[in-house]
Amino acid sequence: MKLIEKLLLTLTMISFATLAVAQTQIYSEFKTNDEENNIEVFKHASPSVVHITNSRLVRSFYSLNPQEVPQGTGTGFIWNEDGYVVTNFHVVQQASVVTVTLQDGSSYEATPVGSDPDKDLAVLKIDAEGNKLSPISLGDSSLLEVGRKVIAIGNPFGLDTTMTVGVVSALGREIDSVSRRKIRDVIQTDAAINPGNSGGPLLNSLGQLVGVNTAIYSPSGGSSGIGFAIPVNTVQRIVPELITYGRVQTPILGIIQVPQPDYYRSLWDIEGVIVLDVVQGTDPEKLGMRGLQRVQRGRIRLGDVIFEIDGQAIANEDDYANVMEQHRAGDVVEVKTLLDNSIMTYNIELRAPPNR
């Protein structure tokens, strides 16, 4: 009986060993369709992703020689073969020295080219050989749907080129930028985004850029399944202007807005953009648009209050700026205002922003 038990035990062990070998061999060759896609996207896109180090020059109390002190790290990606790199504005904000490290480990000191704090975007330039630069493929964020798979690649906590996978959780979100302006039409994803992922790409299943990871919602500071990305269609509109002009070329209407607008809107119980004054030589001045006026006994008389531009309601400065961003200098817009309880209509030609 003991001989039979030993024989059975031996056969069982051989069976398990054979099964283990078979499973190992099968697993090395087996991938699900989703795994194959993840691996393909990572291999295709990761050479485009860079590590960004933000440093400041600080002078010690005991020495006149400035010391380079790291402020933090983030992520960016290669925009084109000319060496332009896109990242978040807050990644390079207040930096004295910005270093960009490519996937092969080579590092370059970057030159700031342009930035848009309102959209939390910045463009850098590095002097690297063209064969070292792998521009990212661009997608179309308007094609995204809730439930679509997205992939984030970045440098969370300083760990180089890490990939996380998730889905589009929501579209059309709003978040606050560094300048406290609202960034609209933001993508929400549950792909893990941690400190250090900022400025990195959010990719679709084809490995195309659909967003720039910019923020997480987390009381603890770590990923809690709610991350946000600026849609690539916004990025494609802004980045060429940053490269050419150093800033976004949002046209001007020709008005000066009041400071502390929320206080005055509350004071007068109104909605809209309150005109403080008009710019000399612009259409608002020529057409008689009126700003605030001081009348008898120091009282302030309300002038034009813009409540609609080209059929779009204007409740505050964010609405106003959003409409302006949709236009270019030379466009003519229909502006409706409230003036002395009457609705006024002005056809105004937008002008290019002044040089700074």
Image (cartoon, rainbow, N blue to C red):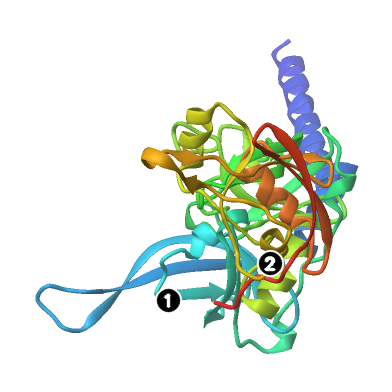
What's the mark number on residue 277?
A: none
Residue marked by disc 2 = 282
Q: Quadrant of residue 94?
A: bottom left
Is residue 43 something one can see in this rendering? yes
Q: Quadrant of residue 252?
A: bottom right
Task: Indicate whether 8 appears above or below 287.
Answer: above
Q: Residue at x 68, y 67 (%)?
A: 282
Q: Nearer the viewer, residue 260 or 93?
A: 260
Q: Mark 1 Cα within 10 Å, few/some/many (few <14, many 20+)?
A: some
- Residue 38 image position (x, y, % from top left): 80, 50
Q: Mark 2 Cα within 10 Å, few/some/many (few <14, many 20+)?
A: some
Residue marked by disc 1 = 97
Q: Nearer the viewer, residue 128 or 354?
A: 354
- Residue 196 image position (x, y, % from top left): 52, 54
Identity of the residue furthest to the left in this view: 62
Task: Indicate whether 56 appears above or below 10.
Answer: below
- Residue 300 image position (x, y, % from top left): 46, 40
Helix, strand or loop at label 2? It is loop
Can you tell which of label 1 and label 2 is closer to the viewer?
A: 2
Cβ atoms under marks 1 and 2 closer than 8 Å: no
- How far separated are the C-alphas under marks 1 and 2? 41 Å
Q: Earlier in the sequence, mark 1 or mark 2?
A: 1
